[in-house]
Amino acid sequence: MVSSIEENLKRVKEALAAAAERSGRDAGEIRLIAVSKTHPVESIMEAVRCGIEAVGENRIQELEEKRRSWEGPPVDWRFIGHLQTNKVRKAVEFSSAVDSVDSPRLALALARAAEERGTTLPVLVEVNTSGESSKHGVHPSQAARLVEVLLEECPALRLDGLMTIGPLSDDISEVRRAFAMLRTLRDGLARDFGRPLRELSMGMSGDYEQAVAEGSTMVRIGSAIFGSRSRP
Ligand SMILES: *Cc1c(COP(=O)(O)O)cnc(C)c1O
């Protein structure tokens, strides 16, 4: 029997490929992160059976529980939620990457935890491109300072790029503007710091086609794969 997760994934992958083609991009350079928050390990297992290699979780406790009960093949467990400094040890222990570093304080705490554990943790800087106060992420004007701290004071962290959450808007041009802002910001930081900062994590179920058009290299898709959630 074909599961709904399998059907959903097929649809998302087709739409992603079409969006990449419209922008003259290679779909192979866009990674699909299946955002599994609130959904059970069985659903993750099904997504992995269908070819998913990276999942996204936004709560440390939920991530820990899922990893402890995980019996499937190795998966990339990306932490995409707001991280409090008192949870950095667990973040280092249970995630393969933290995509939501949004302050020098958090960066330094995470770096110390990674160093204590003897690992190097890949991270992204989360930027608030929409100006919505409900959203986490560093203000665009503070991003350079945070990147500087990461590159110069956090040897146990490996900065791969930037992440953002698009504005909650039906206006496609406003959504695209936010994604374009992240790309422009990345280009400037990459030039100023002499690092590629290759990754642009942007695009969710409702706006990933716009994100792909603006250069996304990682889309974070939850409800379009796993169905709706009772909490955000
Ligand atoms: C929940 C979440 C997503 C996925 O949202 P959908 O709209 O369900 O695709 C992506 N990114 C972050 C940071 C999230 O918290």
Image: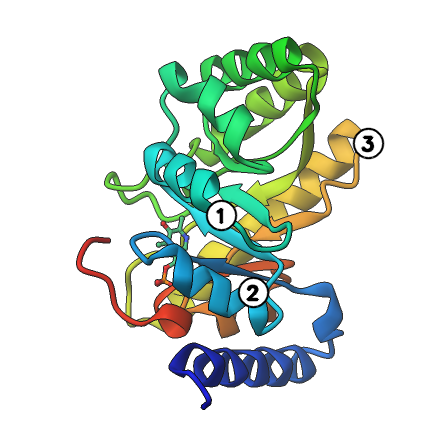
The label on residue 48 is 2
Q: Residue furthest right?
A: 194
Quadrant where the N terminus is found in the figure: bottom left
Image quarter of residue 60: top left
- Whether residue 210 appears in this view of the structure is yes
Q: Amino acid at mark 2?
A: Val
Q: Secondary structure at mark 3?
A: loop
Residue in front for this viewpoint, 172 or 124: 124
Q: Is mark 3 within 8 Å of ligand 1?
A: no
Residue 208 place in picture, x, y as percent: 48, 69
Select label 1 or label 3 by which is in front: 1
- What residue sits 19% from the left and 53% below the top? 231
Above or below, 219 relative to 70? below
- What residue sits 42% from the left and 72% below the top? 225
The label on residue 70 is 1
Image quarter of residue 194: top right
Residue 193 place in picture, x, y as percent: 76, 28
| Pointer 1 or 2: first along the chain | 2
- Badge 3 density bin: few <14, some 14–19, many ≥20, Cα 10 Å: few
Residue 31 place in picture, x, y as percent: 64, 61
- Whether residue 206 appears in this view of the structure is no
Q: Is mark 1 within 8 Å of ligand 1?
A: no
Q: Residue furthest left?
A: 230
**Residue named by callout 3:** 194
Q: Amino acid at mark 3?
A: Gly
Q: CA distance from mark 1 to mark 3?
A: 39 Å
| Pointer 3 or 2: first along the chain | 2
Q: Amino acid at mark 1?
A: Trp
Select label 1 or label 2 by which is in front: 1
